[in-house]
Image: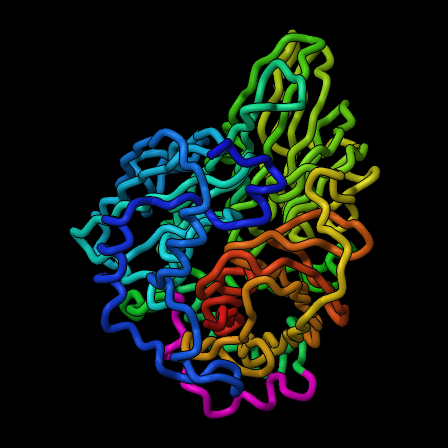
């Protein structure tokens, strides 16, 4: 069998990861409840399970390449954020971000995670159209990995691009448990001299006793009459009375209930016109580029005239970032891993979970790469040095931040990855509901229930309609697929849905299994703004 083209890779499942793995995963899935109804339309037994033969068969159509083996350990460890700030947190090894995993499209990735944390964890491979039983959602596609346990994720990597991985267990992503996944193109069409992977984050864990679990506990109490986040309409906040939040974790087992700790992290008054109003719920003490504060930033070196590929990943929990490189214009080339029509910009806007790639030709000097926490009036910093001069200070605000700001929703898909024209066979409407007042974020007025599935069928063109009935923005993420924005827009897996707006996206149902759809604000998701797409048998 010949090696698949990029279009073929985008249009089908993954290569088989081995019958032994499928058998092992089948055993791991025993005992998971798949008997409940899905969206009130079909019983749970009508849906393909992650360990079904259809999942294996779809991936057996691939021609998997050589296996690339990696080992990863989730540990509690001190992390140096720079500027004399050391915190104790959870991370992959001793690195923040975790050490980059780099493979080539068509490779088989085999990564063994050893869990040395005091709680269960998992790994979700954000943006990849991988086999369903490797997607890393405890209670849906796998059993969680308990303390002292390990699990090997093994799957063919379908297509090149900029991706990342993180837990899908509670609010663990808002600690240090994340790392880049870079998938190289064996027929790379871009020409560049160097590559700079830029991971953005908002940081609270271990600062003055704060933890993400304590932040969630504070937010979950709501604001009473001080509603700044939104108000549900129709099936929104009013319809959620009496729902038990104790079973709404991303994982089958939540972390222990936190004791009150640290100062209040609830944010008031953060606004952004780019985000349609309210910018976020959480006031973070630090904002990071590649694990460093602006007081002691990372420095990237190049020569004048070098062409650099920037791979920018927003790994934050509650913060959109506006990113600019002082003294330079950027040429956007990819959104969420997939190529776009090249577009010039002064600055980039990324919601949580989004990735943007850009090319830049380096001038002579020392330049700030500034990531503005959108609406929160704080910045993260890294430095590009190609000549002499003083390093920029932590307060550097390049004028490009106020120039032409481009986000993924404004980009057009490159011809090689455009969906074939076609009308949707099925439309699923997701109303985004809830408010900051009672912190009852949900989809269609219903908090996450893994037994509820919205049916799709293999071979269909499916339209997802996100209708934001709140007055807060939500970065919505679809697992296991990339979708197309309207009118030839970019192929993406995560998109900002502005307050009071509707966003329609289309995808081809070509990857069987059970797939999450959720807000990538980690606190909104964990409070209930998640649901499941299920492929019918």
In the depicted structure, whether residue 204 falls above or below residue 499: above
Q: Which residues are magenta?
A: 233-250
Indicate the quadrant where residue 481 lies. bottom right
Q: Main secondary structure of the magenta part?
A: loop
In the figure, residue 51 lies in which quadrant? bottom left
At x 43%, y 84%, the residue is 43
> Which quadrant would residue 326 be assigned to in this image?
top right
In the displayed structure, would residue 402 be above or below residue 143?
above
Residue located farthest toward the front when viewing the structure as drawn: 1
> Is 201 drawn above or below residue 255 in the view shown?
above
In this rendering, position of residue 383 left or right of residue 47: right
- Do we see residue 13 in this rendering? yes
Q: Nearer the viewer, residue 144 or 1?
A: 1
On the image, the x and y values in percent for residue 480 come to 51, 55
In which quadrant of the rendered image does the C terminus lie?
A: bottom left
Q: Please name the residue shown 54% across and 38% down the image.
A: 159
Reply yes or no: does residue 145 show up in magenta. Answer: no
Q: At x 43% / y 73%, what residue is drawn? A: 47
């Amino acid at each position: 069998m010949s090696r698949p083209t990029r279009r073929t890779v985008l249009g089908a499942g993954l290569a088989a990861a081995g019958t032994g793995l499928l058998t092992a995963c089948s055993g791991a899935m025993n005992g998971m409840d798949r008997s409940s109804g899905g969206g009130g339309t079909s019983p749970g037994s009508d849906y393909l399970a992650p360990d079904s033969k259809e999942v294996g068969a779809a991936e057996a159509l691939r021609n998997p390449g050589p296996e690339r083996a990696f080992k990863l350990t989730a540990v509690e460890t001190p992390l140096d954020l720079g500027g004399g700030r050391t915190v104790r947190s959870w991370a992959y090894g001793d690195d923040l971000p975790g050490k980059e995993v780099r493979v080539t499209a068509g490779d088989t990735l085999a990564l063994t995670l050893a869990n040395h944390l005091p709680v269960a964890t998992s790994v979700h491979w954000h943006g990849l159209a991988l086999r369903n039983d490797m997607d890393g959602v405890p209670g849906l596609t796998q059993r969680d990995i308990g303390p002292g346990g390990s699990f090997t994720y093994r799957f063919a990597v379908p297509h090149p691009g900029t991706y990342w991985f993180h837990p899908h267990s509670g609010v663990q992503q808002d600690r240090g448990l994340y790392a880049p996944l870079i998938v190289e193109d064996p027929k790379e069409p871009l020409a560049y001299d160097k590559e700079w992977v830029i991971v953005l984050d908002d940081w609270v864990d271990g600062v003055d006793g704060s933890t993400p679990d304590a932040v969630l506990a504070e937010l979950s109490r709501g604001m009473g009459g001080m509603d700044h986040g939104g108000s549900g309409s129709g099936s929104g906040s009013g319809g959620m009375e009496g729902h038990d939040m104790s079973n709404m974790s991303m994982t089958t087992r939540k972390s222990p209930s936190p004791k009150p700790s640290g100062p209040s992290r609830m944010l008031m008054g953060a606004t952004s016109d780019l985000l349609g109003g309210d910018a976020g719920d959480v006031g973070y003490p630090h904002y990071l580029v590649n694990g460093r504060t602006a007081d002691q930033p990372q420095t990237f070196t190049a020569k004048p005239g070098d062409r650099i590929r920037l791979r920018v990943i927003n790994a934050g929990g509650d913060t959109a970032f506006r990113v600019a490189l002082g003294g330079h214009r950027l040429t956007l080339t990819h959104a969420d891993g997939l190529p776009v029509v090249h577009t010039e910009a002064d600055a980039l806007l990324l919601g949580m979970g989004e990735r943007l790639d850009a090319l830049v030709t380096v001038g002579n000097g020392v330049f700030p790469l500034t990531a503005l926490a959108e609406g929160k009036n704080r910045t993260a910093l890294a430095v590009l040095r190609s000549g002499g001069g003083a390093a920029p200070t932590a307060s550097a605000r390049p004028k490009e931040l106020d120039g032409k700001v481009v986000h993924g929703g404004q980009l057009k898909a490159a011809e090689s990855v455009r969906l074939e024209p076609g009308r949707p066979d099925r439309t699923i409407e997701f109303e985004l509901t809830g408010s900051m007042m009672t912190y009852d974020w949900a989809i269609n007025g219903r908090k996450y229930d893994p037994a509820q599935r919205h049916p799709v069928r293999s071979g269909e063109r499916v339209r997802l309609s996100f209708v934001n009935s709140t007055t807060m923005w939500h970065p919505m993420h679809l697992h296991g697929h990339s979708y197309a924005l309207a009118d030839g827009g970019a192929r993406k897996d995560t998109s900002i849905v502005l307050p009071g707006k509707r966003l329609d996206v289309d995808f081809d149902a070509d990857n069987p299994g059970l797939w999450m759809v959720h807000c990538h604000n980690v606190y909104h998701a964990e409070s209930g703004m998640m649901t499941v797409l299920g492929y019918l048998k």
